[in-house]
Image: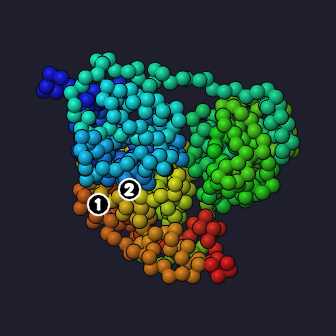
Amino acid sequence: MTSEAKPRVYDVLAKTFIQEGVSTCFALLGDANMNWAARLAQQGCRMVYVRHEHCTVAAAMAYARKTSEVGVASVTCGPGVTQLVTALPAAVRAHLPLVVFAGEAPLKSSWYNQMLDQAPLITATGAAYQSAHLPERMPVVVRDAFLQARRERRPVVVGIPFDLQDRPWEGPEKLPTPSLELLPRPSPIPPHPDDVAKAAELVAAAERVVVFAGLGAVAAKAGPACRALATKTGGLLTTTLPARGLFHDDLYCIGISGSFTPEVGLEYLKEADLVIAVGGSLAYHAGGGGQLWPKAKMLQIDVDPVGMSQGQVVARHHLRADARLGVEALTAALPARSSAKMWRSEAMAARIRDSKPDSMVFEIEPGLLDPRDAVEALEKSLPADWELVNSSGHCSWFFAQMPSRPQEKFLTIREFGAIGNGISFAMGVAAARPDSTVVLFDGDGSLMMHVQELETIKRHGMNILIILMNDGAYGSEVHKFRSEGMPEDGSVFGRPDFAAIARGFGLDGQTFTRLDDLPERMEAFARKGGAAVWDFHVSDRVLSPTMRRAHPPGKHAKA
């Protein structure tokens, strides 16, 4: 293992991570983690060496979501740790299990340039921090960090002084029992019969039912059960944004519910008299506290149902159960519904199928594209088996409107509202699905925040096609400024030549100002493979429906 007779502490720590089943680690090296990382790589772990510490955690987040494993990242002490404080809150709020190996300043030094009290900084983000200052206990601390990350479904940062890592190992030869062998494996929770009966009465009395599924429904494999419930009630189907595509091939799916609801979906949600939320947290952006369905009661089926969420009163009726078992029990308890009481119809299915997500007309400047047209063309041209990653920002509304794409090929993590994560998420998915092509949908401002990771993509040979909606601005901010009648200078930056930038990093780069040759270019890329940046020049005059609702023209003046 080493050239010395006795292993070092970092050797044993690397073995502990391997025993935890770690096969991929996203890292940026420094004095306080480099020896450990080198040993981890020597023991068979694939190391993805990124160019910015933030991207270690952001990539690990997407990897964790895509694989259902603990994501692992590593940074050095001091400035390496401070760079994590934007990514960690997002991981906490997305309930993603991560373990971050972070160095700490050497204990033997009375002064060290990168010394910092790291624990308060990390715990302020909502993540956990574990200091390991006794070498003999370090493997146990690491094991317990994995146990905590899995059980609490949040990031755990392990801080280990790098002078202690370099000591000869004096602890026990046997490593502690790995976390997976200690973690309880509870069976899915069935519903209580009394609760099922009450829920069935509520549903039977409703006339216009919407079954609304979140990631909990995805995890519980409750998709078929939700379809069966909607069929029996004659109702409609919808999902949260992260669960988008769960019902992609169902005639009665109205798309996403929340900030990204398409036009026809908004209309039908207003008519609903009962929304059955299955395996979702009922976050504000998924339903806005009920504003999208003002006539509807809400029944939540979840292992941890809530009455309040993010300051809003949400569900008043609850069925505590595993998503699949709860929906199946409710469906079985419902009486047959007559065709006269069925809300759904063939005409409704046709309208859902044929309606555009947004029909607002905008005047598009010559030489620029309507982002809605670009997304529609991409929907037709992208191969069905490619992995899709949607970033944040104004452009993400348009990219979310791809109704034919299944949920298992789609990833978005939007908690904490930060842009700039897209390229890291794409790298995480590429690491999780190395034999697939990953398509990242992003904005120009977001990519510029971590454009250096184009080199990481090239160096690691990742198959990533980056699709940019380039409006030459921070899209959300420019529209907010305009709605309030304020100067927009600080939000408009022009259009850098992203195709040339991509080529400078060794990737393919192309610019799109028309769409007629998109299928041909897509076929050529599919044959060639590799990585590329495609820069779509879009008009900044097109506002998403979300932006139009939240920031109507003259809002500032009216206030």
Q: Residues within 10 Å of mark 1 (few under 14, many from 20)?
A: many
Report which residue position mark 1 lands on.
502
Q: Nearer the viewer, residue 89 or 18?
A: 89
- Residue in view at x 41 percent, y 23 percent: 178
Cα distance between the residues tagged 2 and 1: 10 Å
Q: Amino acid at mark 1?
A: Ala
Residue at image mark 2: 466
Is 525 on the left-hand or right-hand side of 266? left
Which residue is found at the position 50% from the left and 46% from the top? 126
Q: Please tell me which residue is depicted at 22% across the width and 34% down the height of the picture.
A: 166
Q: Quadrant of residue 2?
A: top left
Q: Quadrant of the N terminus?
A: top left
Vertical placement of residue 101 versus 358, above or below: above
Can residue 226 be seen here? The reply is: no
Q: Position of residue 499 (x, y in %)?
A: 31, 64
Element type at mark 2 = strand
Packing grade of label 2 (10 A; few <14, some 14-19, many >=20) is many
What kind of residue is marked 2?
Ile
In the rendered image, residue 461, in percent from the top left (x then y), is placed at: 27, 45
**Can you say whether 444 is above or below 458 in the image?**
below
- Who's the residue at 35% across and 66% down the image? 511
Residue nearer the viewer, 134 or 479: 134
Quadrant (top left/top right/bottom left/bottom right) for the C terminus: bottom right
Name, please, the residue furthest toward the left: 3
Taking the image as shown, residue 533 lies to the left or right of residue 267, namely: left
Q: Quadrant of residue 491?
A: bottom left
